[in-house]
Amino acid sequence: MTTKLTLNEALDIVRAPKHTLVLCHKNPDPDTLGSAFGLKHILEHFGSRVDVACCDKPSAKFSFITGGACTELKNEEYERIIAVDVASPMQLGELSCFSDRVDLIIDHHAMNTRFAPYYEDLGASCAEIIFSMYKELGIKMPKHFFECIYAGMSGDTGGFRYSNVTTRSMEYGAEVISHGIDHAEINRIIFDSRTLGEIKAQKLTFEKMELLCDGALAVIMFTNEMKDEISIGDEDISDIVNSIRSIEGVLVAVSLKQSQKDPHKFSVSSRSNCDIDVSAVCVQLGGGGHVRASGATVVSPDPVSAFNTCIPLFEKAVKDYKDKSNG
Ligand SMILES: [Mn+2]
């Protein structure tokens, strides 16, 4: 049984100066990174020494968030561990060994498994929560803090466009911008800039993807063999599900990515363009997330069996939705 904390209880933890490890979720996106590095500023303000760690290497384009800081786990002893934007121990990937030592979870996922004392708020991004902490604390923060927060807010809302955007998202966004950050440049980096490896991955994705359920379900299985073929790494395919999701007529997009470190592991990312709840499907696969953006990791001997484990569940969800819509 874990404890639900109030904002002030969470802030009491944050205020205590301690040598702290902040953990991000695997496949790091702007929200987990922006929340972690934003929180690092707050913790440092109160005299803590802070390292941020993630099991996967962040894309080079997010160095404006990390400031080039190492996000590999250092061989140090920490007095306190805080997880940000992490819905379950599984989402820590290889750092899940720390899950039973986490002192505080700060998260916005409705499906959070609450594996440690947690402070949650179901806002559009975890960065919104870090920003609400900053507001409550009434402290002064450097410009980089606001860049981190903006990156998280914008990343998880697709540039303040998704259905998760609330009036609070817009109000916070406006307040963050008032600190003189270059929000247009941050959005350009997140949404309009790709590494060459990502472009190559996108090209191969469009060649190899499959359209099922009469074009309503787009699926890409990205194998290690495909990565070798175009000399790219895992960091280049973190976002491929969003490429196929934009195809007209697609209701649900799913990517299955074979891990280079462990070829028997396949990470599933799913996006819904409608009311189909992809998190319900991902829960069946041992994962979870948001209604319209969810993931899981499946263990399978080979790509074909990974496909056969996952895709029929998504097909069923799409078919059920279509049947219901057709009355
Ligand atoms: Mn998030």
Image: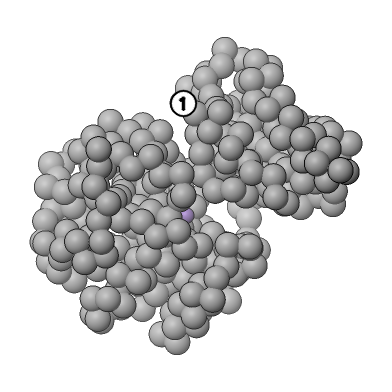
Q: Where residue 106 sits in the image (x, y, percent)?
A: 33, 55
Give the residue drawn at x 45%, y 50%: 109
Residue 214 percent coordinates (x, y): 89, 36
In the picture provided, is 8 more to the left or to the right than 33? left
Q: In the image, 120: left or right of 238?
A: left
Foreground residue among 62 and 272? 272
Q: Quadrant of residue 94?
A: top left
Colour scheme employed for the rendering of this structure:
one colour
- 119 relative to 183 in the view: left or right: left
Quadrant where the N terminus sits is: top left
Pick whichever, 264 or 277, lies toward us.
277
Q: Nearer the viewer, residue 95 or 198?
A: 95
Q: How many marks?
A: 1
Which residue is rendered at x = 25% and y = 61% of the image?
Answer: 6
Asked whether mark 1 lies closer than 8 Å to ligand 1, one says no
Above or below for 177 versus 238: below
* Residue to which mark 1 is pinned: 261
Spot occupied by residue 311 in the image (x, y as percentages of width and height): 70, 27
Q: Residues within 10 Å of mark 1 (few under 14, many from 20)?
A: few
Q: Nearer the viewer, residue 12 or 81?
A: 12
Residue farthest along the top direction in this orientation = 301
Q: Is residue 252 visible?
A: yes
Residue 68 visible at all: no
Residue 129 location, x and y as percent? 37, 65
- Pick the quarter of the image with the C terminus: top right
Residue under the point 55% across and 27% down = 285
Classify residue 48 by image quadrant.
Answer: bottom left
Residue at 12% over, 66% down = 47
Q: The disc labelled 1 sits on which kind of residue?
A: Lys
Label 1: state its secondary structure.
Answer: loop
